[in-house]
Amino acid sequence: MRVAVYGAGGVGGYFGGRLAQAGHAVAFVARGEHLAAIRRDGLAVASVAGDFVVRPAEAVEDPADIGPVDLVLVGVKAWQVTETAKALSPLLRPDTVVLPLQNGVEAADQLCAVIGPERVLGGLCKIMSLVAGPGKIRHAAVEPRIEFGERDRRKTPRVAALREALARCQGVSVDTPDDIEAALWEKFLFIAPVSGVGAVTRMPVGVVRRVPETRALLAAAMDEVEAVARARGIGVRADIVARTLGYIDGLPETTTASMQRDIMEGRPSELEQQNGAMARLGRQLGVPVPVHECLYRSLLPAELKARGQL
């Protein structure tokens, strides 16, 4: 399978690297020092599931240098999806599959608006990973997992073929849930509260879950995501808040979300696509989301400063 990974960061670098390790022809779209290091030394992944190096690694700045592929993994930040969609055309054939792996619940819609719905699957991933330096990815925690499916719930040959390809990758678990939209919202119920509360408190998961007041804040934020999901007709499981709190209790003490790390380190973040999206969707649907409104408004000045707007 010929694969293009657009965005060779913690997500794209890890999963693209595992596909290359499994023998697929993978090309990474990257930039700057990261691109130069991958070209020179390969892509090095330090992982709790086993270290490996992709060498030589095909890496480019311009996707036109790759040409049409079977699969595009979209690994950029959620706020970069629309811009990325406009650059995908050199990679696309009529049967190319485009799989977004962003946090949030709007990436697939944004891709469909630019490249059309026929190529786009719904998708998500679960992993704690980051760029540790030029050409270096560090997977620090969470069993790496990809879930995807047709957005209309059809069982198609392309979903089955992609599942088979990913299932052969070391260090990756894969699932094709019956309802990928519900799966996306169940992940959103985890990531938006953890990101927002972690960024406001500047504390890792181990502290946030242990302090009764911040644990209650997490649970209230999760309740709001569930309420918005149900107002949109999304079939999240009845016990999803309890399940998610249980999952959080099993995470390493030092776990932090990528949005939290970006805000704490003064970088542009996914605030608009996480707590901001919850505030916006709540207002649109008439569902009160006071916790997410507060998290969003509290973090917005730091976001504006990181983007040079303050």
Image: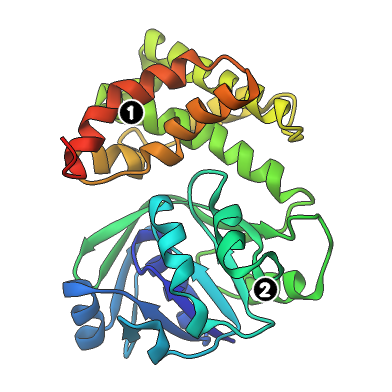
Disc 2 residue type? Leu
Asked if residue 299 lies left or right of residue 84, the reply is left
Label 2 to label 1: alpha-carbon separation: 34 Å
Q: Where is residue 243 in the image (x, y as percent from the top left)?
A: 62, 28
- Disc 1 marks a residue whose amino acid type is Gly
Is 308 situated left or right of 169 in this image? left
Residue nearest the observer in this picture, 183 or 122: 122
- Residue linked to disc 1: 198
Residue 291: give x, y in percent of width and height: 45, 16
Q: Residues within 10 Å of mark 2 (few under 14, many from 20)?
A: some
Placement of 216 over or under 72, stated as above or below: above
What residue do we see at 34% from left, 45% from top?
Answer: 258
Quarter location, residue 7 = bottom left
151 horizontally vs 33: left or right = right
Quarter of the rendering occupied by the C terminus: top left
Q: Give x and y (percent) for residue 69.
A: 55, 86
* Numbered label attached to residue 271: none
Look at 27% across and 83% down and name the residue there. 42
Residue at the (59%, 60%) spot, across then down: 113
Which residue is located at x 30 percent, y 77 percent?
43
User: Can the viewer see residue 246 in this picture?
Assistant: no
Which residue is disc 2 drawn over? 162
Percent x, y of residue 169: 55, 73
Q: Earlier in the sequence, mark 2 or mark 1?
A: 2
